[in-house]
């Protein structure tokens, strides 16, 4: 999608590189593992698993991969214990960064995350050091098409329980409270909508511009290094990146 949406501008998308090497499937597979071990392998009775499956499908993950990940997490194919950890810190220029990981070795991952921050002019902070600058929300993104009526989409979203609705040049962005995310997503699916993305996220309350080209380059290097780390599943930040950089 084109880079006019706030969502694409504040969440570091990993689609380009990960799609080429399949890394995003590995990352989502770990999220599936966490969901299964938390609530079981039946998505009918596990809302978190339903959410991750929806995320997997929005990233074009084949059903075979999804089912295999569920079986692995159920202990049918392997016995690897993952845990979720959130790291917080500052990137170059004082940009707040939240890094969500799913790892089977917290010592290795903590060392890797700290190294990435340090190498790129940032620093890893304590839990809570930047989290207060973000809000936990559900974010649903629908690609606009000529046969969609904006008012109708907004009505469906708000009736489903959405907190906010925004229409951009080529997408509709729907925000929910975290606890309402699953029910809103499922209600919109029942209306026949498909999603470019649908997930819970950390959204910055305010964003900062990076005006120094060298600082911007260092910040991109930091994001790229997090992207290349298999343990990292999501990266959120409060940088206001130039719109043209979000064009695909």
Image (cartoon, rainbow, N blue to C red):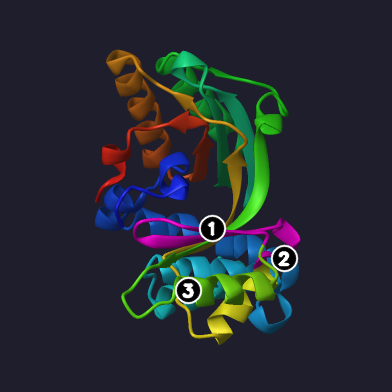
Vertical position of residue 57 compared to residue 203: above or below: below
**Residue at the spot 54% in from the left edge and 85% down from the top edge:** 191
- Measured Cα–Cα span from mark 3 to mark 1: 11 Å
Which of the two discs, 2 and 1, labels the residue nearer the N terminus?
Answer: 1
Name the residue beneath numbered marker 2: 180
**Answer yes or no: do the residues labelled 2 and 3 have beta carbons within 8 Å?**
no
Name the residue beneath numbered marker 1: 30
- Measured Cα–Cα span from mark 2 to mark 1: 23 Å
Q: Magenta span covers which residues?
A: 163-181
Which picture quadrant has residue 200? bottom right
How many residues crowd mark 3 within 10 Å: few (<14), some (14–19), many (20+)?
A: some
Tag 3 secondary structure? helix
Picture disc at residue 210: none
Vertical position of residue 35 compared to residue 23: above or below: below
Name the residue beneath numbered marker 3: 66
Residue 90 horizontal side relative to residue 246, left or right: right
Vertical position of residue 65 compared to residue 108: above or below: below
Tag 2 secondary structure? helix
Is residue 77 in sight in this rendering? no
**Residue at the spot 26% in from the left edge and 39% down from the top edge:** 244
Is residue 146 in sight in this rendering? yes
Q: Nearer the viewer, mark 2 or mark 3?
A: 2
Nearer to me, 76 or 68? 68
Vertical position of residue 173 compared to residue 243: above or below: below
Report if residue 224 lies within the magenta region.
no
Which picture quadrant has residue 219? top left
How many residues crowd mark 1 within 10 Å: few (<14), some (14–19), many (20+)?
A: many
**Answer yes or no: do the residues labelled 3 and 1 have beta carbons within 8 Å?**
no
**Residue at the spot 35% in from the left edge and 17% down from the top edge:** 211
Residue 126 placement (x, y as % from top left): 69, 23
Residue 75 placement (x, y as % from top left): 62, 70
């Amino acid at each position: 999608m084109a880079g006019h949406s706030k969502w694409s501008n504040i969440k570091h998308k990993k689609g380009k590189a990960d799609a080429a090497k399949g890394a995003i499937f590995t990352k989502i597979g770990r999220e599936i593992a966490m969901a299964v071990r938390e609530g079981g392998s039946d998505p009918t009775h596990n809302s978190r698993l339903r959410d991750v499956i929806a995320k997997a499908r929005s990233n074009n993950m084949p059903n075979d991969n999804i089912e295999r990940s569920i079986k692995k997490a159920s202990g049918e194919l392997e016995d690897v214990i993952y845990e979720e950890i959130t790291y917080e810190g500052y990137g170059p220029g004082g940009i707040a960064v939240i890094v969500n990981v799913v790892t089977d070795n917290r010592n290795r991952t903590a060392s890797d995350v700290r190294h990435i921050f340090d190498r790129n002019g940032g620093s890893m902070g304590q839990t809570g050091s930047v989290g207060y600058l973000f809000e936990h929300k559900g974010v649903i993104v629908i690609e606009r098409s000529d046969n969609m009526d904006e008012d109708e989409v907004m009505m469906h979203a708000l009736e489903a329980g959405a907190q906010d609705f925004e229409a951009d040049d080529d997408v509709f962005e729907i925000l929910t409270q975290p606890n309402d995310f699953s029910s809103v997503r499922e209600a919109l699916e029942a209306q026949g909508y498909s999603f470019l993305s649908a997930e819970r996220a950390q959204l910055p309350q305010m964003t900062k511009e990076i005006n120094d080209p060298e600082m911007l380059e260092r910040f991109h290097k930091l994001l790229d290094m997090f992207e290349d780390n298999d343990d990292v599943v999501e990266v959120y930040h409060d940088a206001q990146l130039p719109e043209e950089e979000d064009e695909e």
